[in-house]
């Protein structure tokens, strides 16, 4: 009789451990997949922003005849963006492109005809939309990283997070925080 | 964390949707049975079978096309990619923040500030905003309102609320029909037991719309608070939604031309009535604003 109770108890405890392990291992996997998904959302928007550049250059060229430097800067920033491979490189290149675009739009203030053109207005609306989507995607990414990191660094989650390290957050790059410098 | 209660909410909405469907199918089948018992007692069982078949198809149509029915009922039109680019961008941005696929965007021609979401899950969802909202709300306010609707989509409120809209609408129509058949039946000759059936039918006919309206009222009040809170979490700016609700309070007359059976879908009650204290589908705006400001 006693033996049976012991056997049952042992089986029960093992079953419980298995269920808990499966739960936590899956939970960590789900959260880490969510980070990947969140990153791909940012990636899509970064790419859309880069795709906007040729159109913008085409529109701006005719009006901004004395700003070749700024225009070249945007084109170069776009090329760097498109050739970036790793997540880190993309984050940095994205910040560079954002800064270059800001310069263009700041310079556009000096060209009333350009500002009044429908094409330019549409581009500005599109770019505003993309910028806010990037901001939201970054928010979702950082939220996802937070839940993932919380789970794998606290007990009991950390017991099941073998070899996993906390994910880095998507920080706003210095270049994006700095005010735009416009040289005349 | 709050994520847990969020998943609870999704599970609860899915469960409630199933319960609601079964309840409505059974209730309507019972109503039909009572009507036929009164009029043609010999066909009662056949009609019961008919009613069940029809109701089950109705339920599945409600599930599949409920969003289309609701959108038609409000006269919503798809948002124009150029004219409403700003609204579409806002909706897409907030759906990214919430981690759901971008819903379809519609615009309702109306001067009142209002918005609603409908559909069956985040993959089949729509958001509609009135032209009054587009005109009167600034950027942060519109973001707050859209965030509120996106939250309804994310936690499957829309599945339950769309089902309520379409199924409850039917109960109201059918019970109205039953009341009329009662008047017909009481004039004709009825056998024993008819009195009881009439009484039951009469009670059902009176209580069905009241019951459905009560269900409608209790389900959405808590949801609105929850969606307000989630919206604040998405936009990180509760003041935006608070100030939008303030404008709704001051500008809206509560005179939108929409059916009572879909009023619970809107962010703010589209038709105000003296019965609101009892059957209000929305918590008072003052209370919602107060909570948002305290965040």
Image: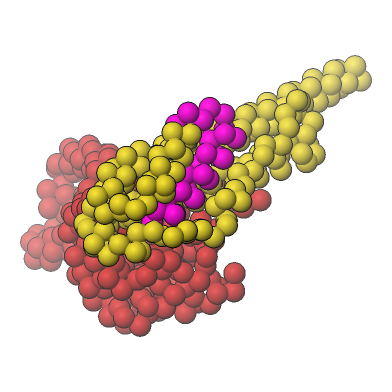
Q: Quadrant of residue B188?
A: bottom left
For the question of whether residue A117 can be seen, the reply is yes
Q: Colour of chain A?
A: yellow
Residue B85, x across and y down, in percent: 28, 54
Specify the segment rendered in magenta: A82-105
Q: How many marks?
A: 0
Q: Main secondary structure of the magenta part?
A: helix
- The residue under the point 50% across, 42% down is A94
Residue B226 appears left or right of B58: right
- The residue under the point 67% across, 37% down is A167
In this picture, is B229 found above or below B120? below
Q: Nearer the viewer, residue B225 or B99?
A: B99
Q: Quadrant of residue A35?
A: top right
For the question of whether residue B67 can be seen, the reply is no
- The residue under the point 52% across, 67% down is B238
Q: Nearer the viewer, residue A149 or B164?
A: A149
Q: Nearer the viewer, residue A124 or B288?
A: A124
Q: Quadrant of the C terminus of chain B?
A: bottom right
In this picture, is B9 found above or below B237? above
Residue B241, x across and y down, in percent: 45, 68
Q: Quadrant of residue B168?
A: bottom left
Residue B135 appears left or right of A130: left
Residue B29 appears left or right of A26: left
Q: Nearer the viewer, residue B160 or B4?
A: B4
Residue furthest right in the image: A2
- The residue under the point 51% across, 44% down is A96
Residue B139, x across and y down, in percent: 39, 66
Q: Label the red chain with its letter.
A: B
Magenta span contains residue A179: no
Residue B144, x across and y down, in percent: 44, 64
Residue A142 appears left or right of A158: left
In this picture, is A8 found above or below A81? above
């Amino acid at each position: 009789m006693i033996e049976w109770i012991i056997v049952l108890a042992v089986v029960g405890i093992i079953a419980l451990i298995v269920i808990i392990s499966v739960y936590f291992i899956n939970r960590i996997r789900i959260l880490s997949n969510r980070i990947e998904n969140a990153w791909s959302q940012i990636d899509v928007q970064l790419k859309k922003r880069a795709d906007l550049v040729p159109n913008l250059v085409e529109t701006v060229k005719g009006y901004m005849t004395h700003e070749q430097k700024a225009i070249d800067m945007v084109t170069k920033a776009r090329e760097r963006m498109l050739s970036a491979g790793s997540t880190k490189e993309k984050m940095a290149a994205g910040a560079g492109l954002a800064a270059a675009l800001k310069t263009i739009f700041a310079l556009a203030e000096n060209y009333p005809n350009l500002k009044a053109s429908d094409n330019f207005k549409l581009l500005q609306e599109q770019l505003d939309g993309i910028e806010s989507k990037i901001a939201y995607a970054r928010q979702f990414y950082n939220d996802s990283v937070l839940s993932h990191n919380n789970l794998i660094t606290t007990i009991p989650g950390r017991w099941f997070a073998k070899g996993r390290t906390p994910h880095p957050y998507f920080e706003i790059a210095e270049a994006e925080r700095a005010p735009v410098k416009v040289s005349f | 964390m709050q994520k847990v209660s969020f998943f609870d909410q999704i599970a609860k909405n899915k469960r409630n949707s199933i319960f609601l469907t079964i309840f409505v199918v059974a209730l309507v089948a019972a109503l039909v049975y009572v009507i036929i018992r009164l009029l043609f007692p010999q066909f009662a069982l056949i009609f019961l079978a008919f009613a069940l078949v029809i109701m089950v198809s109705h339920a599945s149509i409600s599930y599949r096309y409920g969003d289309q029915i609701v959108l038609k009922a409000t006269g919503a039109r798809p948002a124009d990619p150029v004219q409403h680019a700003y609204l579409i961008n806002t909706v897409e941005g907030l759906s990214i923040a919430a981690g759901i696929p971008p819903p379809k965007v519609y615009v309702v021609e109306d001067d009142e500030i209002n918005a609603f979401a409908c559909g069956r899950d985040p993959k089949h969802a729509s958001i509609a905003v009135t032209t009054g909202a587009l005109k009167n709300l600034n950027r942060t306010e519109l973001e707050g309102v859209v965030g509120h609707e996106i939250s309804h989509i994310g936690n499957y409120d829309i599945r339950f609320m769309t089902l309520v809209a379409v199924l409850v609408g039917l109960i109201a129509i059918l019970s109205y029909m039953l009341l009329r058949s009662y008047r017909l039946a009481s004039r004709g000759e009825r056998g024993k037991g008819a009195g009881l059936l009439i009484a039951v039918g009469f009670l059902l006919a009176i209580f069905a719309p009241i019951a459905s309206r009560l269900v409608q009222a209790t389900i959405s009040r808590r949801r609105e608070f929850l969606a307000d809170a989630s919206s604040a979490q998405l936009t990180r700016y509760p003041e935006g939604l608070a100030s939008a609700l303030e404008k709704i309070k001051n500008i809206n007359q509560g005179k939108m031309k929409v059916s009572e059976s879909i009023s619970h879908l809107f962010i703010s009650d589209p038709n105000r009535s003296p019965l609101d204290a009892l059957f209000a589908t929305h918590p008072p705006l003052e209370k919602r604003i107060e909570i948002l400001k305290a965040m």
